[in-house]
Image: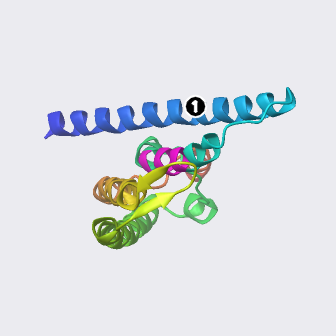
Amino acid sequence: MKRLAAVYDGFLAVLAAASALAFGAVAFFIAYEVTVRWLGFRPPVWPVAVSEFTMLYATVLAAPWVMRQGSHIQVNSLAAVLPAPVRAALGRGLSFLGMAVCLVVAWYALRVTLTAQGLEIRSFEMPKWLVYAPLPVGFLLLAIEFARHMVAGTLFGGEEIEYFSRRQA
């Protein structure tokens, strides 16, 4: 089981690295387009569409890694002042809710992906199913991350939690 978890964590790290590279490419595309325009040339039309699709893919596929690292934004002021057992129970309940929502979104995204027909036409043609393809994958992976937090009771963490835990002790 630990081997499977290690492989899965490695997979999330690969997705995160690919997403980081993709965001770097988007920054390059935007700088390229602005520079070409500033030099008085007509910029190509493809960077806008490529940037839009890249941001969708990179965001959805990196989100599970961000959650795994605990680097997502949390408003944990209430959780920070709760006793540890109550905080863990609240975290498990919210993790279950998050997992359920992600599974519903993944299911509907899969249905949309499988039934999408035609082409998404911007500066180039792209099959519509390919536009939606990262959504079921990303939300399924997020559901898995919520399930991991639910089992471990680790949804709430960070400096605020540690600070209030030390003060209460």
* Whether residue 34 is situated above or below residue 131 in the rendered picture: above
Residue furthest to the front in view is: 42
Classify the position of the N terminus by image quarter: top left
Residue 19 screen position, x and y as percent: 48, 37
Q: Which residues are magenta?
A: 53-61
Circle 1: residue type: Ala
Kindly identify the residue that appears in the image at 45 percent across and 41 percent down.
69
Residue 163 screen position, x and y as percent: 61, 45
Q: Main secondary structure of the magenta part?
A: helix
Kindly identify the residue that appears in the image at 25 percent across and 39 percent down.
8
Residue 9 screen position, x and y as percent: 30, 37
Foreground of the two, 153 or 168: 153
Look at the image and name its color scheme: rainbow
* Whether residue 108 is situated above or below residue 31 in the rendered picture: below
Foreground of the two, 48 or 134: 48
Q: In the displayed structure, does residue 96 sit left or right of residue 120?
A: left
Q: Which residue is mark 1?
A: 25
Foreground of the two, 36 or 99: 36
Kindly identify the residue that appears in the image at 57 percent across and 36 percent down.
23
